[in-house]
Amino acid sequence: MGDYQIAVLEGDGIGPEIVGETIKVLHAVQRKVRDLRMEFRYLPVGLKSYKTDGSTLPNETIEGLAKCDAGILGPVTTHIYDTSDPNMVNPSGTLRKYFDLYANIRPAKNYPGVSSRYEHVDLVIVRENTEGMYADRNLHFGTGEFMPDPDTVLSFRVVTRKGSERIAKVGFELARSRRKSLTLVHKMNVLRKGCGLFYDSCQKIGAAYEDVAVRDYHVDAFALHLVQRPEVFDVVVTTNMFGDILSDQAAGLVGGLGLAPGLNLGDHFMIAQATHGSAPDIAGKNMANPIAEILSAAMMLEWLGIRNHDQSAFIAASMIQAGVAKTLQQNKKTPDLGGTLTTEEFGDALVSVIESS
């Protein structure tokens, strides 16, 4: 029986709009799926929280998340945050580090009714989420960027055997449940020690998965192959920055970031978060595409089902995923996909499909 406490962090920009539709959809599947119960706990985050609580990520939010089974986070407008202000941290990066959400899982697939230059794309990028070049989370204290003089910046990249092995295990387990094909992406010809350690660690884990076929590419070569023949790839495992860039590229192959969900996964906690940003230029206009955030929540339910052996969570996740596909097939789309529906109208259309299923 599924009985879950879900934290809701609306975020900045379009966050409250798309998160609102996501909760609407979760309520719809909860009404449909027997034995699934979710209680939603709203917690402050982002620019609104900074104005009211003096912090973009107050202690109240961190403590509240720790009492929940999972969280849903809207996008945050971090590019305008004042990084010199210790109370204006990046909530996304900070939470990934605090809860050790080391795996960022980002699928990209074609949907019927959505125009795309490619067909038969169905891949998942599994991105290491707590190390690499990301200066706000790759050190225990402080930031991984330094300025020895006003005209020079030194940026550290962190790669550990532990981080590499555990992201590889997530990737191989996922590949085993899909088409049994895994691709390692690195830049070992230049970053011999860092990418070399990542590659060797992944191959070590892969030795226990003889049923999964493994190939590897340098990141620049993989970027080329991704736009030439994306349909051949299944699960892709890579480091933090490479994964961040390649997942956006993959989203562009299937219709854009509005269709790009994501899940930040750790051993004991998870946060659903769409790949895209906060789009402040369209915030409040009721025209944002909520699909990526909704599908992120579906991924959350799927993994709650895996972790808790809970069939009700699996059913709810499948119901959302099937409902999104059917709604798009009916040509019910937001403007970014060539449609005319508002954010709320798409959410209502999806709920209607779910209720009639």
Image (cartoon, helix red, strand yellow):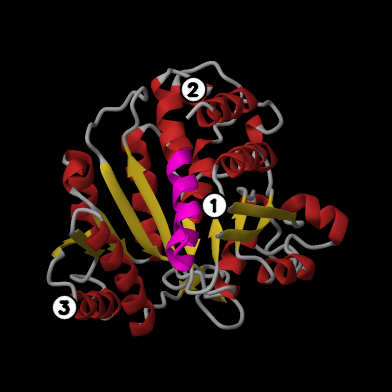
Q: For the residue labelled by badge 1, is the local secondary structure a helix, a strand or a loop?
A: loop
Q: For the residue labelled by badge 3, is the local secondary structure a helix, a strand or a loop?
A: loop
113 versus 198 height, above or below: above
Q: Position of residue 93 (x, y in %)?
A: 57, 64
Q: Most extreme residue toward the right, as rendered?
A: 52
262 versus 155 height, above or below: above
- Read off the residue under disc 1: 273
Q: Quadrant of the N terminus?
A: bottom right
Q: Amino acid at mark 1?
A: Gln
Alpha-carbon span between mark 3 and mark 1: 32 Å
Which residues fall within the magenta stretch?
Answer: 302-320
- Residue nearest the viewer, comparing 288 with 350: 350
Q: Position of residue 206 (x, y in %)?
A: 19, 74
Does the magenta segment cover residue 284? no
Q: Amino acid at mark 2?
A: Lys
* Image-quadrant location for residue 19: top right
- Residue nearest the viewer, comparing 5 with 114: 5
Q: Amino acid at mark 3?
A: Ala
- Read off the residue under disc 2: 333
Q: For the residue labelled by badge 2, is the local secondary structure a helix, a strand or a loop?
A: loop
Judged left or right of residue 126, residue 38 is right
- Read off the residue under disc 3: 207
Asked if the residue under mark 2 is in contact with the one under mark 1, i.e. CB atoms within 8 Å, the reply is no
- Residue nearest the viewer, comparing 87 with 259: 259
Say which residue appears at 58% left-offset and 70% top-offset: 150
